[in-house]
Amino acid sequence: QTVQIEALEEMLALTVLTIPGNKGMTPRFLSASIKFIDNVLVGHKFNIETKVISWRRGILNGTAKGFVNGNVVCEAELMITIP
């Protein structure tokens, strides 16, 4: 489950770090509220969908969902700082 959390955080950070002018910034994890619905096993294809809710003064709030075979296996509300 730790790998799932890290993957959700990284993908949310990438949604902002790919914007021109943000290259090279270092994101830091602040907090998360995570709900695990099902297990992800070796061999499963883990797809991630993220949404930025707000990004002000270097604080990024967003949501992320993890899917296996089209079914939600975990979802999270995340807060990341990007100075």
Image: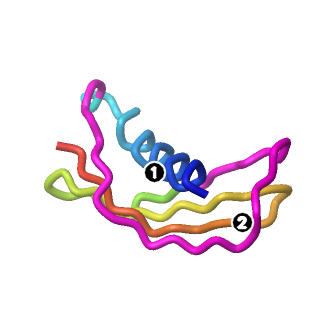
Which comes sooner in the sequence, label 1 or label 2?
A: 1
Asked whether residue 31 is drawn in magenta, I would say: yes
Q: Magenta region: which residues?
A: 23-49
Quadrant for the C terminus in the image: top left
Q: Secondary structure at mark 1?
A: helix
Label 1 crowd (10 A; few <14 / some 14-19 / many >=20): many
Residue 49: image location, x then y, percent: 60, 54
What residue sits right under mark 1 in the picture? 9
Residue 75: name its quadrant.
bottom right
Give the class, few, some or many, for how many residues have Cα within 10 Å of label 2's Cα (few <14, many ≥20). some
Furthest toward the top, the residue is: 24
Q: Residue 9 in the image: state x and y as whole percent.
A: 45, 51
- Locate residue 7, reporting x and y percent: 55, 46
Q: Is residue 75 above or below residue 56?
A: below
Q: Horizontally, is 32 left or right of 1 in the view? A: left
Find residue 73 and name its label: 2
Amino acid at pointer 2: Val
What's the mark number on residue 74? Answer: none
**Which residue is at 79% across, 45% downward?**
45
Horizontal relation, residue 67 to residue 16: left or right: right
The amino acid type found where label 1 is placed reads Glu
> Relative to 50, does residue 34 appear above or below in the rendering?
below
